[in-house]
Image (cartoon, rainbow, N blue to C red):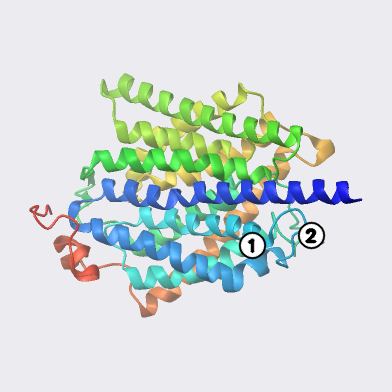
Amino acid sequence: MDQYLLISDFTYIVDTLFILFSMVLIILMVPGFAMLEAGLVRTKNVATVLTVNTMIYAVASMAFLLIGYKYAFGSWENTSLSMYAAFMFQMAFVGKTVNIMSGGVSERVRIIPLSIFTVVMGAFIYPTVVNVTWGVNFLQDTALALSMYDLAGSTVIHSTGGWALLAAILVIGPRKGRYINGKVRVIPASNIPLVVLGALLLWIGWFGFNGGSVGSITTKEGADAVALTIMNTNTSGLAGAIIAGLIMYVRYRKFDITMILNGALGGLVAITAGPDLYTIYQPIIIGLIGGALVVFAVPLFDKIRIDDPVGALSVHLINGIWGTLAVGIFAADPENGITFMGQLKGVLVIGTFAFLSSGLVIYLINLVFKFRASDEEQMQGLDIEECGLEAYPEYKRSI
């Protein structure tokens, strides 16, 4: 009996440490998003972008602590590891849905209305999605009950954030001067080194994102599952970067580092639904398709005047959908409830809910607190109006 208790305590302690370490890696994605977005916007908006990312982490996490977590999972109780570690791991995810959205509406979104939306996302919208997938599932006895497999959130996190972003862009509109006489005005990134740093921080954070979602590392099988998950995650990112670089070179005879990095992120999003289910070769195919989708989706969104400064829709929404469907293509297992139609149903149900609920909340908030900065404020730069300081005061601001 004493030996059993000792072994039980050991697994509890090790799994708690494993989940806490994974949580720390996920939190590294906070500066990852901040640096990526700060590098892709103009210098006159950098301080605002950094403030938004910091506020999202604080506000979304607090909303999830006070309301969202128990709503999603029904209870704080956990027998396999510390309930506090379990909460912290899940809390690390919640802000990512709004990070995805905030980057796509950069350079024209105000901090106060976005913070209000973050409260609703952290307390209700995202927890509802978690509830019906990873949580207590209030839909389980209805026709809408889901059997979708999504290990770490291709749909639950990335597509949810992507649908919220699409709704926000439709309400807020494009940046002033982005589309002129039917043509796309190119607005170059302000700091490529920051873009590279941010993307690589996200890449590193993904190992905790996906690896930690396996849940346990205290058995040989668990350790192998975690290692396979992390390897497949990395492989898909590599494939996404390679194909994006190749496509850009074939089309333009140039290597665009921003597109290469977004290709890598697209591969990482795509693998997130099922990295524990694949062989070591299937992630290459999934990542190649994911990276290619990013390259072709970015100009497509511009053609229909959907202004997304960081390519978040192409990376997170498109590849969130692709990655979820890929599970039904490459890892279908009807005996265990994994089918293509089940994956498709999950994409449709969650996509419909996330888009409509986010759109409604954004529309209502916008009636009171305008999301969009005025044309004059956009010309001056949001840093002065929203933050009262500039990230690069010694530089002449571009218009």
* Residue 241 picture location, percent across and down: 42, 28
Mark 2 or mark 1, earlier in chain: 1
Taking depth in this image into account, of 2 and 60 the one nearest to the observer is 2
* Residue type at the position of mark 2: Gln
- Residue that label 1 marks: 84
* Callouts 2 and 1 close, C-beta under 8 Å: no
Label 2 packing within 10 angstroms: few (<14), some (14-19), many (20+): few
Residue at which label 2 appears: 140
Query: What residue is rendered at 63% in x and 64% in y?
Result: 128
Q: Is residue 4 left or right of residue 231?
A: right
Q: Quadrant of the C terminus?
A: bottom left
Q: Is residue 138 left or right of residue 275?
A: right
Q: Looking at the image, is 129 positioned above or below residue 343?
A: below
For residue 274, the mark is none
- Residue 329 falls left or right of residue 23: right
The three-letter amino acid code for the residue at tag 1 is Tyr
Q: Percent position (x, y) of residue 348?
A: 62, 51
* Nearer to me, 81 or 166: 81
Identify the residue at horizontal 58%, vertical 27% (top origin).
283
